[in-house]
Image (cartoon, helix red, strand yellow):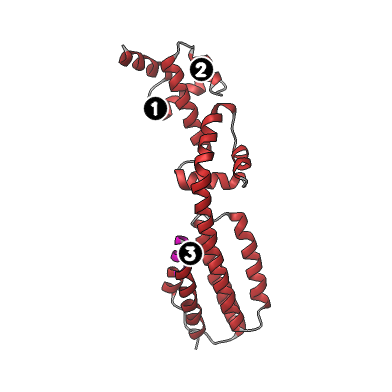
């Protein structure tokens, strides 16, 4: 008689993959697979379906934890091919363990990449915010895809790439408003805005005041 396997083990496994806990993943995946066998009919085809199902869930967990999508493509394709080609349940057991550990390591690798590259990316954007910097520019610096740059900023900084660039441009404009007597239209153009109205709209949305009000308040404080 076929019964549903224990989903709490699958949840436990996905959480360990997200945490990048390789040793725990190696242990839990064995428990998960054993439960998959005991709760099923024991047929190879059924175990292939269950293995594919669990691995898909675990891959999604790795993606949610920030693993590089491009690096997930190869394990996904390879594992599905191996599942189809498997001749024994023992081969499936080895496959799901190996792939789960690979996924946990991809999560770890991405965290190390973030720690190393994000400060560089942030500094680059701040320096070139008024030069029309794009995701592609940052992707070239980090040697990744523009889409991955978007995920990086969104997941780690909690904001879209374009929004971060805008904040950097507004921060620079604040300095010009406070430290110079340049016309607001000139500051707007220098900051990469197409016109003064759009600049004022963005400035007020982020600061709560217009550029003119900000300049006036700064001079009052200085005086």
Using the rendered image of the protein, determine whether residue 60 is visible from the camera's viewpoint. Answer: no
Residue under label 1? 207
Q: What mark, if any, has residue 192 been given in the picture? A: none
**Mark 3 or mark 1: whose residue is earlier in sequence:** 3
Q: Residue 196 location in percent, x, y?
A: 51, 18
Splitting the image into 4 quarters, where does residue 129 fall? Answer: top right
Element type where label 2 sits in the image? helix
Q: Circles 3 and 1: CB distance less than 8 Å?
A: no
Q: Residue 62 location in percent, x, y?
A: 52, 60
Q: Mark 3 to mark 2: distance in Å?
A: 48 Å
| Label 2 crowd (10 A; few <14 / some 14-19 / many >=20) | many
For residue 24, above or below residue 36: above
Q: Circles 3 and 2: CB distance less than 8 Å?
A: no
Element type where label 3 sits in the image? helix
Residue range (magenta): 13-19
Q: Mark 3 to mark 1: distance in Å?
A: 40 Å
In the rendered image, residue 175 lying in the magenta stretch gets the answer: no
Circle 2 or circle 1, nearest the eye: 2
Report whether 84 appears left or right of 61. Answer: right
Using the rendered image of the protein, determine whether residue 159 is visible from the camera's viewpoint. Answer: yes
Q: What mark, if any, has residue 17 been given in the picture? A: 3
């Amino acid at each position: 008689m076929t019964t549903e396997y224990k989903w709490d083990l699958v949840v436990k496994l996905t959480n360990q993959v997200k945490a990048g806990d390789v040793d725990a993943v190696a242990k839990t995946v064995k428990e998960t697979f054993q439960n998959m066998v005991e709760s099923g009919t024991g047929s190879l085809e059924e175990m292939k379906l269950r293995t594919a199902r669990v691995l898909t869930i675990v891959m999604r967990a790795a993606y949610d934890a920030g693993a590089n999508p491009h690096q997930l493509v190869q394990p996904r394709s390879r594992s599905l091919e191996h599942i189809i080609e498997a001749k024994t349940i023992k081969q499936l057991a080895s496959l799901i363990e190996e792939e789960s550990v690979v996924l946990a390591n991809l999560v770890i690798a991405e965290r190390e990449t973030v720690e190393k590259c994000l400060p560089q990316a942030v500094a680059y954007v701040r320096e070139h915010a008024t030069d029309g910097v794009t995701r592609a520019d940052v992707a070239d610096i980090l040697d990744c895809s523009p889409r991955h740059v978007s995920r990086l900023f969104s997941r780690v900084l909690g904001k879209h790439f374009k929004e971060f660039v805008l904040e950097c441009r507004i921060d620079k404009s604040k300095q010009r408003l406070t430290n110079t007597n340049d016309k607001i239209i000139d500051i707007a153009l220098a900051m990469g805005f197409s016109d003064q109205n759009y600049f004022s709209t963005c400035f007020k949305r982020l600061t709560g005041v217009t550029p003119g009000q900000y300049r006036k308040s700064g001079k009052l404080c200085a005086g």
